[in-house]
Every structure is written in C-alpha cells, then in structure tokens.
Amino acid sequence: MGAETTPDTTTERTGLRPDLRQRHVRMIALGGIIGASLFIGSGAVIHTVGPAAVLSYAIGGLIVVLVMRMLGEMATASPSQGSFMEYARTSLGGWAGFTVGWLYWYFWVGVVAFEAVAGAKILQTWIPVVPQWIFSLVLMLSLTAANLASARSFGETEFWLASVKIATIVVFLVVGTLFVLGAWPGGSFSVGNIAQDGFLANGPFSVVHGVVIVIFSYFGAEIVTIAAAESREPETAVRKATSSIVWRVIVFYVGSVTLLVMITGWRDIPATTSPFAAAFGRFGIPAAETVVSAVVLTAVLSVLNSGLYTASRMLFALRGNGWAPKWIADTNRRGVPWKAILVSTSVGYVAVVMNFVSPDKIFYFIINSAGAVALFVYAIIAGSQLRMRRRLEAEAPERLKLRMWGYPWLSRLTLAWTLAVVASMLFVDADTRAQLYLSLISLAVILAVYFIQRRRSGREHRKTPL
C-alpha cells in the first residue's frame, strides 16, 4: 500500500483529478443505498415475508452497516483508487484483488444495462409511441456524456438525482408518521397494522428469505469509498460517509418499510407496483402514481449514472495492477479515464441490445450471473479487514483513525453471516438458486482467468508493505 497517501499524490500517480466536492461525496453516500428496489421492490418483499419484512430489512441492513464499517476502517487508513479491490490484493493476495475487481466491474455493467431498460419502460408509459430501445439508447448516451465530461460533472448529476430520492423519502417519512398517528387529514391511528395476522404471519423462515432478497437492495453504499479517491479530502469523506450509514439504513429503509406496513394492512400493499405510490395516494396527494414514477425514474438514472462511474473506475484501477489492457489507463486533459468509461458503457449497450434480441436467454444470463456478487464482495471485504487490521496494529497503528467495532469477533461474525446468506440462497426458491449457480460460474471463470494469466506471466501480486 506504500506510505500514507495524500490526495495530491494520489491524483499525480493515477492521472485522475480530485474534482469531487464534499457535497458531492456526501450526497453519493446518502443516495447510494436508495434505488428503485426500495420504491418498487419493497412491496414484493412485504408480500413474501409479511409485517416481519421490517426484520428482514433490519438484519440485511445490519450486515451492510458492519461491512461498511470495516471498509471505512481500511479506506481511512489507506485511501486508494480501487478501494476494496486494492485492500483485497494487499491483504489476501492477487487472486482476491483480481476476482473482486472483475466481479464488481461485471456486476455494474450489468446493472447499467438493467437500469437503462427499466428507465425506458417508465418513459414508454408516458410516451408509448416511442420504442423502448430508443429510450434506452438516449439514457445511456446522456449519462455516458455526463461521465465523460469530468468527475465533477458526474458528481453534480448524482447530487441532483440523489436529492430527489432523498427529498421524497423524507416527505414520506414525515407525512407517513403523521398519517399512522391520525394527525394527517384522512388518517387514523393505524400503528396496529404492523401486527395484522401476527407479526410473523408467514413464519420465521420467511424472514431469512427476506434477508436474501433485501440485502441486494443495499448494494451501492460502498461506491462512496471509490468516489472519495477523487475528492480533495478522501480520508475525511470516507470517515463521515461510513460513520453515518447506520442512521441512513435505519431511517431510509427500516423506517420506510415500518411505515408501509402501518399505513395499510400488509395484504393490501401492492406487490407488483410501487407501495409508495399507493401510500401517497392514501395521503391524498394528487397524481401520486405519476409523481412516484418520476421519482423512480430519477432513482433509475442515479443508479445508471453511478454504475457507469463505478465500473469505469474499477476497470481503471484493475489496469493499475496489470489486470486490464494498458490503454485502459488513458485519461483526457480533464483527468477522466475516457477509455475505461467507453469500454464499460459499450458492454452496457450490448446488454441492452440483448434485452430486445434475447431477453429470456442472454440478457437473463448477464443479469443473473452477477446476482450474488454483492455477497461475494462483502465476504472478501470482511476477510481483507481481518488481515489488514492485524498488519496495521503491528506496523502502523496510528493510521487506525476509524476502527471496526468489536474487532476481531464482530468482523468474524459478519463474515460468517455473509456466508450464511450465500448458503441460504440454495433453499429459498428456484430463481434465487439459479442466481447463485450462475454467479458461482462467473466466480469460477474469473478465478480460472487469473491463474491462467499468473502462470503465463510467471508472477504473483504480492502483499504491499504498509
């Protein structure tokens, strides 16, 4: 990892510029865990689990909070481009860095395609005469342009997109609380709805089923540690962002879902459309469905924007270790890794085309073969922190400015919980098992490529001195 890195030396070494402001990083951190899955997918989770979906979101959120705390400890001790990929390389070895880096890149280029298709579907409901593929293309081109302009352009775009999501959740939390307490026009005291048919209406195992589903909703919080490397004060940005994730999870996810199952009985919450639109409708807000659809579109665009940025920066960082072609490292005069962006977005274009050519085969494979990547990444982050903390305490304890709670036992427990969630995917349903199997295939392929490459090059990426 080398000597402690300052923002200036980081940008000099990589060619990137610290164009992201603290407000950009702060909003990336706030909005990073709010995606369309909360606004739409929470209804399906509630129907699967019942009122105890609140527990599923809380348990999944707890795992993510602990993982982010571990990642925060490493990122404040050694801010670096590539974030957890670099920590995996230096702590566990080249195989871990190579694997987590390419898995993460593959995940996000798939997400870019998925979100482009999702955004196009929303737009087509408003303008049905325009084909979906045109909307997908326009969305991809627009956000590719924003990412190519500069890191600041990405940050500014994300700032405003995330602002809309956060403002919507805040309004929902305030009005929803007043509604369930009977202090909003048309509302009545309805807190008791959370126990309709019993809190564990669908049985205890349904909570585990719910955790498997919801934990992927939180994926994206770790983006802030990658973005912080292009800010002026990366250590400060990471420390603040990872320290505040506890209240973000509790307020945004657990708070929202708790209100949803109080506003109306859980059986009456829509499973395939947005439960937030239904709730705003009960509040008496005009055109609630259209308003929430617009908010969902901003959430989709936010994820698409972040996905392009994250995939390109991870690909750029992979090149730093010789794990991607040399030309990937080229930057323009604004310090933007434009070739890494174009490569990442081009894969997204291919995936979008596949959605219209072969939605049930190729597109299905692309999306589902990255389904369990979040859990693989969390497991590698936990393993990296356990190793890196031991080295830091022995060699550079002064750099531990943010510490993981209850080390080493809570770190080990987090790793065990993550692996348990992976194992439980085998017992949930056929679709979840398919995601796990396809993700394991992706993992095996990337590992095979690494060992083939290592044998050909005759070298191993060894741990770097602290």
Image (spheres, rainbow, N blue to C red):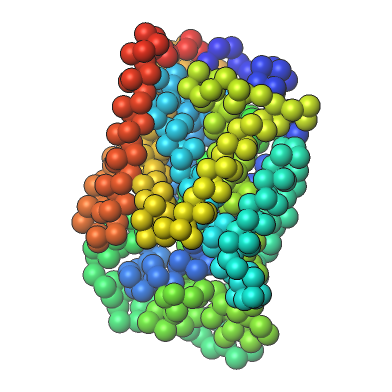
Q: Is residue 414 visible?
A: no
- Residue 342 left/right relative to 54: right
Q: Position of residue 458 (x, y in %)?
A: 37, 8
**Image quadrant assignment for residue 448:** top left
- Residue 13 left/right relative to 50: right
Question: What residue is drawn where x is 70% and y is 22%?
Answer: 15
Question: What residue is drawn where x is 47% and y is 54%?
Answer: 354
Q: Position of residue 317 (x, y in %)?
A: 55, 26
Closest to the observer: 237 or 32? 32
Residue 14 versus residue 217 in the image, above or below:
above
Q: Is residue 196 visible?
A: yes
Closest to the observer: 375 or 57? 375
State the residue lying farthest toward the right: 333
**Image quadrant assignment for residue 25:** top right
Disc count in the image? 0
Q: Position of residue 9 (x, y in %)?
A: 69, 17
Closest to the observer: 372 or 210? 372
Question: What residue is drawn where x is 45% and y is 33%?
Answer: 102
Residue 5 versus residue 229 in the image, above or below:
above
Closest to the observer: 188 or 224? 224
- Residue 335 left/right relative to 244: right
Q: Position of residue 125 (x, y in %)?
A: 60, 75
State the residue lying farthest toward the front: 357
- Residue 2 left/right relative to 373: right
Question: What residue is drawn where x is 39% and y is 46%?
Answer: 370
State the residue lying farthest toward the left: 427
